[in-house]
Image: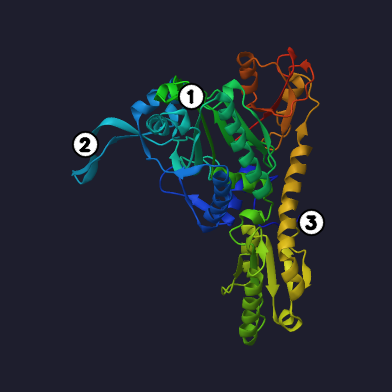
């Protein structure tokens, strides 16, 4: 008899639909009346706030300061950097009017702007304009700022958290006197993101440089962090860009060096977004719902009072409250453990399953017997939903933080094992490559493939049509190169570069 699960369909049956249903069951977000946008609900925003708090501390610890720039960018600013505007032109939302009037019972725009305004798709151009005013001398460098904001990219195909027309993010922008300093900044940002993803979100990543065809528009180099989801597709979890002097020349960001000569600054930009919530869902979720790593969970523990008879309620509630208060005195990752006592008038099974689907790390049941024994029944979300531990109150209080950390480490271990299992190093030619990325079961086209690590000759012109035919991309050229020589998996030419190939979101 097949096991019953809370989410239907299962990941194996229909992964894209599983994602939508798991997200809905966890009450993370919903579609808004505006096409392609989302309403982020408390549990979803709580996860993002913890991501934000964790990363913001790292950003400030590395010398960056937070700022805020306008949502609207003059069209002429984007026009200054040709490759940048070309890269974002199709995704831009444009404001052309600033007044509404009633005509024939309808509101219509009437006052046209002298210059159209772009709703921020990214802020290099408008921040560059300010940099050109703020930077005069080498003494003003490096200039290190960060912005937490929303951006708009008018996507045709949207999916909650993964790709929406409006999303939340942070974008770092820096200016430096030398290329060496700027490239070092790119590495600082990439390392902050690695720590965030691997240590807080428990998502293992591979860091590497993007090929020329996959770079950020206008960048000299783009460093990306690539993660594998449970449908074996790649998800770009963060990027850091060395922009060279391209934007400095376009925005006239110049400084007087120590020799009294004018130079253009070297700039960088880097960012991650609410897409990380989607990455967390797809990296850790199971067929009973999402699973939230404790370090980003809005709540760590839920206490579920079990009331077999009405007369037991006051005693069990009082015990649950005392237990919660004592647990809150314990620390996890330097902060109090966040505990919620769920006293809603719902059937015990329904209430329990709601928290399972939300992915809360620890569930604790207490009833009259537990009150009498000064104990509790504990369930870990990284284990079977029916697997439980019987702990004394003293054992629970002394081990709560250890249990949370164990769950955190287990999620990372499981995700890394899955990625390693579905990473292929032995593919030697294009026929094998095509077979690997071609579904053998046409009824489940999303369940196939994974990562391929293979040699690449570096010829984008020849490679692109071969990859596009399979809907595969070069995810990155990983930092850890083997240093060996071989044949390009696409063209058969001599090659030395190791590349990671995958289908991607």
User: What residue would you read off at disc 2?
Assistant: 111
Is 440 above or below relative to 347?
above
Distance of label 3 from label 1 (alpha carbons): 77 Å
Is 411 above or below relative to 450?
below
Distance of label 1 from label 2 (alpha carbons): 50 Å
Near mark 1 (Cα within 10 A), the count class, few <14, some 14-19 or many ≥20, is few
**Where's residue 69, x and y in %?**
39, 40
For this orientation, the residue located farthest to the bottom is 311
Q: Are marks 2 and 3 in contact (CB under 8 Å)?
A: no
Which dot, 3 or 1, sits closer to the camera? 1
Distance of label 2 from label 3 (alpha carbons): 67 Å
User: What residue would you read off at disc 1?
Assistant: 258
Is 233 above or below relative to 251?
below
**Where's residue 28, x and y in %?**
54, 54
Q: Nearer the viewer, residue 379 or 168?
A: 168
Near mark 2 (Cα within 10 A), the count class, few <14, some 14-19 or many ≥20, is few
User: What residue would you read off at disc 3?
Assistant: 1
User: Horizontally, is 74 left or right of 219 in the view?
Assistant: left
* Quadrant in the rendering for residue 27: bottom right
Q: Say how many tags the image has.
A: 3
Which dot, 2 or 3, sits closer to the camera? 2
| N-terminal label among 3 and 1 | 3
Q: Are marks 1 and 2 in contact (CB under 8 Å)?
A: no
Which dot, 1 or 2, sits closer to the camera? 1
User: Horizontally, is 213 left or right of 141 in the view?
Assistant: right
């Amino acid at each position: 008899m097949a096991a019953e699960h809370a989410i239907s369909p299962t990941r194996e049956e229909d992964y894209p639909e599983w994602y939508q249903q798991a997200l809905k069951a966890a009450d993370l977000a919903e579609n808004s009346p505006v096409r392609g946008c989302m309403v982020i609900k408390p549990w979803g925003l709580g996860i993002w706030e913890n991501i934000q708090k964790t990363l913001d501390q790292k950003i400030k610890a590395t010398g960056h300061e937070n700022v805020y720039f306008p949502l609207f960018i003059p069209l002429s600013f984007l026009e200054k950097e040709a490759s940048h505007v070309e890269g974002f032109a199709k995704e831009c939302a444009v404001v052309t009017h600033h007044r509404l009037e009633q005509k024939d019972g309808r509101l219509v725009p009437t006052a046209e702007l002298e210059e159209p305004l772009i709703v921020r798709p990214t802020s290099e151009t408008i921040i560059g304009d300010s940099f050109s005013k703020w930077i005069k001398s080498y003494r003003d460098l490096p200039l290190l700022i960060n912005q937490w904001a929303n951006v708009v990219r008018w996507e045709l195909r949207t999916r909650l958290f993964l790709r929406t027309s409006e999303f939340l993010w942070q974008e770092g922008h820096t200016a430096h006197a030398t290329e060496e300093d700027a490239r070092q900044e790119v590495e600082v940002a990439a390392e902050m993101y690695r720590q965030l993803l691997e240590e807080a979100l428990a998502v293992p990543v591979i860091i590497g440089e993007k090929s020329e065809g996959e770079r950020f528009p206008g960048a000299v180099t783009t460093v990306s962090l690539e993660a594998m989801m449970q449908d074996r597709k790649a998800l770009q979890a963060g990027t850091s860009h060395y922009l060279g002097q391209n934007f400095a020349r376009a925005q006239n960001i110049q400084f007087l060096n120590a020799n009294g000569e004018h130079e253009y600054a070297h700039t960088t930009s880097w960012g991650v977004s609410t897409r990380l919530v989607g990455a967390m869902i797809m990296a850790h979720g199971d067929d009973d719902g999402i699973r939230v790593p404790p370090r980003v969970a809005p709540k760590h523990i839920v206490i579920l009072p079990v009331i077999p008879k009405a007369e037991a309620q006051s005693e069990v509630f009082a015990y649950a409250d005392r237990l919660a208060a004592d647990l809150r005195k314990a620390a996890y990752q330097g902060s109090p453990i966040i505990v919620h006592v769920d006293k809603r008038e719902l059937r015990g099974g329904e209430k329990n399953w709601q928290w399972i689907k939300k992915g809360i790390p620890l569930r604790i049941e207490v009833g009259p017997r537990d009150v009498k024994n000064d104990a509790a029944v504990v369930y870990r979300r990284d284990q079977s939903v029916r697997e439980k531990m019987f702990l004394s109150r003293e054992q629970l209080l002394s081990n709560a933080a250890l249990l949370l950390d164990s769950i955190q480490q287990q999620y990372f271990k499981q995700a890394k094992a899955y990625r390693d299992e579905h990473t292929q190093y032995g593919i030697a030619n294009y026929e094998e490559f095509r077979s690997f990325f071609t579904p053998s079961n046409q009824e489940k086209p999303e369940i196939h493939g994974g990562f391929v690590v293979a040699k690449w000759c570096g010829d984008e012109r020849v490679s692109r049509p071969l990859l596009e035919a399979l809907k595969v991309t070069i995810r990155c050229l990983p930092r850890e190169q083997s240093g060996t020589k071989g044949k390009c998996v696409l063209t058969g030419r001599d090659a030395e570069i190791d590349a990671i190939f995958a289908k991607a979101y």
